[in-house]
Image (tube, grey):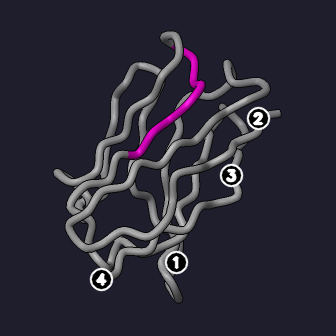
């Protein structure tokens, strides 16, 4: 079992920055990759960024060049994953969720609200 806790959400102005963290605990060695998803108001949850234990990452087109996903921990282990969000736009407003993926199971955090508004 893996427990994920997000933090770092809040209010930012357009053009501003926020950094989200996702702390993993429990059977973290089972995790293959970790992802950030977001759910804008009235819309479906979408993938934002993903990173694996070899530090390979990929991003949604809408955040490329603005968001950066990183992690700490030993090679082949996930401890904490970060999402650095720069040049924020109002359309980035959403609840952001962390997901940890093992070979046969996905784990979710409780989500953290990000609001981009002037």
Q: Are marks 2 and 1 in contact (CB under 8 Å)?
A: no
Above or below 108: residue 38: below
Which residue carries the number 1 mark? Answer: 44
Which residue is at a point 53% across and 38% down the rendered structure image?
Answer: 34
Mark found first going from the N terminus, 3 or 4: 3
| Mark whose residue sits in front, 4 or 2 | 4
Which residue is at a point 55% across and 68% down the rendered structure image?
Answer: 113
Name which quarter of the figure residue 24 lies in: top right
The answer to whether 30 appears left or right of 112 in the picture is right
| Mark whose residue sits in front, 3 or 4 | 4
Cα distance in 3D space between marks 2 and 3: 10 Å
Cα distance in 3D space between marks 3 and 1: 17 Å
- Residue 70: mark: none
Cα distance in 3D space between marks 4 and 2: 37 Å
Residue 80: image x %, image y %?
A: 55, 31
- Residue 109: mark: 3
Residue 35: image x %, image y %?
A: 50, 45
Instruction: Name the image quarter holding the C terminus.
Output: bottom left
Please tell me how crowded label 2 is: few (under 14), some (14-19), or many (20+) other residues with Cα within 10 Å. Answer: some
- Residue 2: mark: 2
Which residue carries the number 4 mark? Answer: 118
Of residues 7 and 38, which is closer to you in this image? 7
Name which quarter of the figure residue 87 lies in: bottom left
Cα distance in 3D space between marks 2 and 1: 24 Å
| Mark whose residue sits in front, 3 or 1 | 3
Disc 1 secondary structure class: loop
Disc 2 secondary structure class: strand
Mark found first going from the N terminus, 2 or 3: 2
The answer to whether 102 appears left or right of 60 in the picture is right
Query: Where does the magenta region start and end?
Result: 76-83
């Amino acid at each position: 079992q893996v427990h994920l806790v997000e933090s770092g959400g809040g209010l930012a102005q357009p053009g501003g920055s926020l950094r989200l963290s996702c702390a993993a605990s429990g059977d973290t060695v089972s995790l293959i990759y970790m992802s950030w998803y977001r759910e804008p108001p009235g819309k479906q949850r979408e993938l934002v960024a993903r990173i694996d234990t070899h530090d390979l990452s990929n991003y949604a087109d809408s955040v490329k060049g603005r968001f950066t996903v990183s992690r700490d921990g030993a090679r082949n282990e996930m401890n904490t994953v970060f999402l650095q969000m720069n040049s924020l736009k109002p359309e980035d407003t959403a609840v952001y969720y962390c997901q940890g993926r093992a070979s046969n199971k996905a784990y979710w955090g409780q989500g953290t609200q990000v609001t981009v508004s002037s």
